[in-house]
Image (cartoon, rainbow, N blue to C red):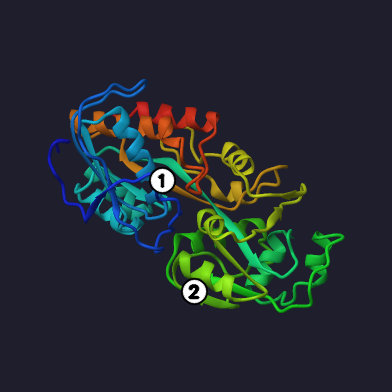
């Protein structure tokens, strides 16, 4: 498959630096990103081929990919890059059918997908490149509460309906000196299928295994509170409901001006910041030693590392380790190299976590090994 061959994609719009909100899988749709060719420029650390590179998948990483495409075209203006945010499942299907060059996914490939991906890659394994991390905020609407500290157990019990008042002793113990109101808690959850929901429930399963008994999955399992469609709907529901709390991507909470809780994993309360989320990513472990970088998210979510904010969504680029033609391999490597370097520049403002240096080094080693 030549990089010059125009593959099937959905509607494509020019990428814009103005997009600031993180959209989770099943979240608010936004136009797909693309780059436009122009005069060639060179890139330090990235060769600049010519042609078209197509990708499809996770909408959680879509706005980050738009930012990366914009930076990439400053370096490699003769490569057109299209990203179609159809969701992780659709992206993997299109990748396995050799209809796109790489796929964005909110989770690692399942066993049946691994086999299909290897077939698509000419009998070679597909690799996971974890490029985009998005913090999940616990946004709330509590009169007079400028600060709120929660831990895994209290979050689990709130979203299962076991803690129902803000002045519950378990919450009060985490907020010494604060006056919490005798107000009913209204948990707000995603009523649509969502990668954010899946990662939120995976976090609770790892961080509070005794308290959270509902498992994970893209559908909310907690059984308490009120549902809202998409991330924008969660924000609107929190704003309209005194006493409410909901899980939503940082970009949405930030844009709406909602406060969000600190998390105490056992080593003190930790705010959601670039530094604390970056520290969590920096301590993330991989399940193997090779270039297939599948994350051990349970270890990240269950971490008690001081100063680390562990609640986040991680997304992968699914690529062939081998099996591309030479032009496509060059374009994939070039794009991912810029993505891990210059492409990180504006991600914080868009609600994502810029990659720490040590993590980036491991990622670039994997990218460089693509053949």
| Left or right for 352, reference 322 | right
Which quadrant does the N terminus fall into?
Answer: top left
In the image, residue 371 sits, relative to residue 262, either above or below, namely above
Q: Which residue position is annotated with label 2? A: 228
In percent of width and height, residue 225 lies at 59, 78
| Disc 2 element | strand
Instruction: Name the one closer to the observer, 222 or 59.
Output: 59
| Marker disc for residue 211 | none
In percent of width and height, residue 176 lies at 85, 59
Mark 1 neighbour density, 10 Å: few (under 14) some (14–19) many (20 or more): many
In the image, residue 292 sits, relative to residue 156, either above or below, namely above
| Left or right for 58, reference 7 | right
Residue closest to the far right? 177
Among the 4 quarters of the image, the one containing residue 22: bottom left
Instruction: Name the one closer to the observer, 175 or 300.
Output: 175
In the image, residue 131 sits, relative to residue 88, either above or below, namely above
Among the 4 quarters of the image, the one containing residue 85: bottom left
Q: Which residue position is annotated with label 1? A: 64
In the image, residue 101 sits, relative to residue 25, either above or below, namely above
First of labels 1, 2 by sequence position: 1
In percent of width and height, residue 141 lies at 65, 69
Mark 2 neighbour density, 10 Å: few (under 14) some (14–19) many (20 or more): some
Residue closest to the far left? 5
In percent of width and height, residue 26 lies at 39, 64
- Evaluate whether residue 290 shows in this view: no
Write the residue at 20% across / 32% down: 38
Instruction: Name the one closer to the observer, 123 or 309.
Output: 309
Question: Alpha-carbon distance for marks 1 and 2?
Answer: 24 Å
């Amino acid at each position: 498959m030549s990089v010059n061959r125009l593959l099937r994609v959905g509607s494509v719009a020019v990428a814009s630096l103005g997009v600031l909100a993180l959209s989770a899988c099943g979240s608010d749709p936004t136009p797909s990103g693309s780059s436009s060719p122009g005069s060639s420029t060179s890139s330090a650390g990235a060769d600049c081929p010519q042609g078209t590179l197509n990708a499809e998948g996770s909408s959680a990483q879509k706005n980050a990919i738009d930012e990366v495409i914009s930076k990439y075209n400053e370096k490699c203006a003769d490569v057109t890059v299209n990203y179609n945010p159809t969701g992780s499942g659709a992206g993997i299907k299109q990748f396995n059918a050799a209809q796109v060059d790489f796929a964005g996914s909110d989770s690692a490939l399942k066993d049946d997908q691994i086999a299909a991906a290897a077939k698509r890659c000419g009998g070679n394994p597909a690799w996971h490149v974890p490029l985009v991390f998005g913090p999940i905020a616990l946004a709330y609407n509590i009169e007079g509460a400028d600060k709120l500290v929660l831990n895994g157990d209290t979050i689990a019990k709130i979203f299962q309906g076991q803690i129902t008042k803000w002045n519950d002793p378990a919450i009060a113990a985490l907020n010494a000196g604060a006056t919490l109101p005798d107000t009913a808690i209204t948990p707000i959850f995603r009523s649509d299928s969502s990668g954010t929901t899946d990662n939120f429930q995976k976090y609770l399963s790892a961080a509070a295994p005794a308290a959270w008994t509902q498992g994970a999955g893209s559908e909310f399992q907690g059984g308490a509170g009120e549902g809202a469609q998409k991330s924008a709907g969660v924000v609107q529901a929190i704003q309209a409901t005194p006493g409410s709390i909901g899980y939503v991507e940082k970009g949405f909470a930030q844009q709406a001006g909602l406060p969000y809780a600190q998390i105490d994993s056992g080593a003190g309360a930790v705010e959601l910041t670039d530094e604390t989320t970056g520290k969590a990513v920096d301590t993330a472990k991989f399940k193997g030693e090779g270039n297939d970088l599948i994350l051990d998210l349970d270890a990240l979510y269950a971490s008690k590392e001081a100063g680390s904010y562990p609640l986040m969504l991680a997304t992968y680029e699914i690529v062939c380790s081998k099996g591309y033609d030479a032009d496509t391999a060059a374009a994939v490597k070039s794009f991912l190299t810029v993505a891990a370097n210059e492409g990180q520049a504006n991600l914080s403002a868009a609600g994502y976590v810029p990659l720490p240096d040590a993590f980036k080094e491991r990622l670039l080693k994997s990218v460089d090994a693509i053949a």
